[in-house]
Image: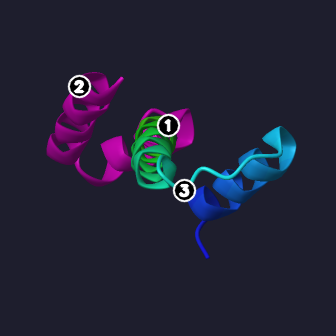
Amino acid sequence: MSQVQLDIGSLERATCRLFWADKAVIQQVQAASYQQVFLVSGMSHPKFLETLQALSPRGYDRIAKVAQTLS
C-alpha cells in the first residue's frame, strides 16, 4: 500500500466519508504533490548539491535547472 493510499484512508476516517468517486483524482493529485515536494526538497538540499557539485559540475547545473522548473 502506498503512502498516498494511506493518506486517503486517513482522510476518509477523519471526515467520516468515503471518496469512491473522487478517489482516483485525489490519489493522482496527492502523488503529484509528493513527487514535487520530495524531488524539489532532495534536489535543493545543500548536502546533495555540495556532493553533486563535487562529482559532476555539469550534472549540478542540470539538476539545478530541473529543481527550479519544478518549484
Q: Residues within 10 Å of mark 1 (few under 14, many from 20)?
A: some
What residue lies at 60% left-to-right and 50% top-to-bottom?
A: 19
Instruction: List the residue tagged with mark 3.
Output: 20
Q: Mark 2 against mark 3, which lies toward the viewer?
A: 3
Displayed quadrant of residue 4: bottom right
Instruction: List the residue tagged with mark 2.
Output: 69
Q: 15 or 57, which is in the foreground?
A: 15
Magenta-tinted stretch: 42-71
What residue lies at 33% left-to-right and 41% top-to-bottom?
A: 53
Sequence-wise, the earlier of marks 3 and 1 is 3
Secondary structure category for the residue under label 1 = helix
Residue 69 in magenta? Answer: yes
Secondary structure category for the residue under label 3 = loop
Q: Mark 3 against mark 1, which lies toward the viewer?
A: 3
Q: Kindly identify the amino acid type of the residue bearing the numbered disc 3.
A: Trp
Looking at the rendered image, the quarter that the N terminus falls into is: bottom right
Sequence-wise, the earlier of marks 2 and 3 is 3
59 relative to 3, above or below: above
Q: 62 or 3, which is in the foreground?
A: 3
Q: Residues within 10 Å of mark 3 (few under 14, many from 20)?
A: few
Q: Main secondary structure of the magenta part?
A: helix
Q: CA distance from mark 3 to mark 1?
A: 26 Å
Tell me residue 38's x, y (percent): 50, 44
Q: Kindly identify the amino acid type of the residue bearing the numbered disc 1.
A: Val
What residue lies at 85% left-to-right and 43% top-to-bottom?
A: 14
What residue lies at 19% left-to-right and 34% top-to-bottom?
A: 61
All told, the count of numbered labels is 3
Q: Is residue 4 left or right of residue 53?
A: right
**Mark linked to residue 37:** 1
Q: 56 or 18, which is in the foreground?
A: 18
Sequence-wise, the earlier of marks 2 and 1 is 1
Q: 41 or 14, which is in the foreground?
A: 14
